[in-house]
Amino acid sequence: MSIKQGRMSDRIQQILSQLLLREIADPRLQGITVTEVKLDPELMVAKIYVSAMGDESRQDTVMAGLRRANGFLRREVGKRIRLRSTPELHFHWDHTLEHAERINQLISNLEIPPESESGLDADH
């Protein structure tokens, strides 16, 4: 990722976070977080990853709300960044938290027997 891509990704993430927090009235989009923005090298397409922070059951309603608000969000991003053309916004659900929780569950369910003290003293 180039420096410009990184700066623009960070800026778009900030703008979208502010818009979702302060300017979107759709109740489906309350309490969601923009977790990551990835821009293509030409700065024409932005993949935006969102999460409802632990409430995976809201995925369908959140994604529907974002599809409906996409035009408004893109227009507002365009007003606030300096690019020749505003990138298309493609929203994706971020499964990172879901995967991390699953891994934590698997680890906590592992049955690891304690090390036997005789095994430690075998060398002496």
Image (cartoon, rainbow, N blue to C red):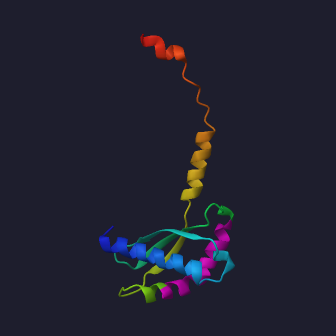
Secondary structure that dominates the magenta span:
helix
Does 37 sit above or below residue 24? above
- Where residue 10 appears, x then y in whole percent? 41, 72
* Residue 50 among magenta residues: no
Left or right, 19 with respect to 9, comes to right
Image: magenta residue range: 58-76
At a point 55% along the width and 18% down the height, the residue shown is: 116
Query: Which quadrant of the figure contains the C terminus?
Result: top left
Q: Seen from this angle, which residue lies furthest left?
A: 3
Residue 70 is one of the magenta-drawn residues = yes
Residue in the picture at 66% in, 63% down: 55
- Residue 77 vertical position relative to residue 95 in the rendered view, above or below: below
Relative to 16, 81 lies left or right: left
Marks counted in the figure total 0
Residue 93: where, in percent of width, then height? 57, 66
Q: State the image coordinates of residue 83 (x, y, percent, origin top left).
A: 36, 85
Residue lying furthest top in this view?
A: 124
Q: Position of residue 3 (x, y in %)?
A: 30, 71
Identify whether 8 is placed above or below 93: below
Residue at position x 55%, y 82% in the image:
70
Quarter of the picture containing the N terminus is bottom left
Q: Quadrant of residue 45?
A: bottom left
Q: Nearer the viewer, residue 104 or 1?
A: 104
Is residue 57 left or right of 106 when viewed as pictured? Answer: right
**Residue drawn where x is 65% and y is 62% of the image:** 56
